[in-house]
Amino acid sequence: MLALGESLAPARAAGVVLIATAIAVLGLTPWRLVRANRPAVLASVLTGLTIAAYTLIDGVGVRASGSAAGYTLWLIGLECSATAVVAALLRRRTGVTAGSDARGWLLAGAVTVMSTLAYGLVLWAQTRGALAAVAALRESSVVVAALIGVVVFKESLGRVRIAASVAVALGVVLLAVPG
């Protein structure tokens, strides 16, 4: 909001703050663990700053391009080209050859299509609303990750994390309030 001079209706601003606060609570770790894992905490903070930077860059870029689909395809195309060059260079250096496992290639193709569509959807949303609201909504996926942890990995959620997840859901509802 500050970087782009955007404004939000009070309910939507409250939704952004609620989601951000609840996500921070979901990630809370006792201080003794933070001190013991400073490199991991630093990496997490730098990752968050990187996400904030590319969210701003993508938001400005997709709006300037005039086409979410075109912007998405250009970025993915450039990324895939760069990745192919790096992979070829690494293969040459290490002597590893490409496998011919059709199932692996099919899975990789499906993941590529799904991630491109998801990324394109976020970029499209950035052309339709305030970046703060879109970014908050996007990051609410941590609740889904927490649920996967419970269902798949049998992790316990606890009262604080359940409350934070409910707060994220309430924040999403506030983002939908007409402003």
Image (tube, rainbow, N blue to C red):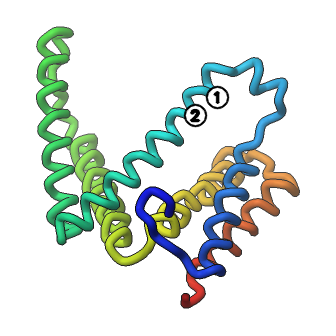
Label 2, secondary structure: give it.
helix
**Which residue sits at x=33%, y=52%?**
57
Label 1, secondary structure: give it.
helix
Label drawn at residue 41: 1
Mark 2 → mark 1, Cα distance in angstroms: 5 Å
- At label 1, counting other C-alpha atoms closer than 10 Å, the crowd grade (few under 14, some 14-19, many 20 or more) is some
**Which residue sits at x=26%, y=67%?**
63
**Which residue sits at x=76%, y=42%?**
28
Q: Is residue 157 left or right of residue 68?
A: right
Question: Seen from this angle, which residue lies furthest right?
Answer: 159
Placement of 79 over or under 116, stated as above or below:
above
**Which residue sits at x=58%, y=61%?**
140
Tell me the quarter of the picture where residue 155 sits.
top right
Question: Residue 117 placed where, x, y %?
Answer: 29, 63
Tell me the quarter of the picture where residue 30 sits.
top right
The answer to whether the residues at label 2 and label 1 have Cβ atoms under 8 Å apart is yes
Question: Residue 158 placed where, x, y %?
Answer: 85, 52
Label drawn at residue 94: none
Tell me the quarter of the picture where residue 171 sits.
bottom right
Question: Residue 19 placed where, x, y %?
Answer: 65, 63
Locate the C terminus and report the quarter of the image it occupies.
bottom right
Q: Amino acid at mark 2?
A: Ser
Q: How many marks?
A: 2
Label drawn at residue 44: 2
- At label 2, counting other C-alpha atoms closer than 10 Å, the crowd grade (few under 14, some 14-19, many 20 or more) is few
Q: Amino acid at mark 1?
A: Val
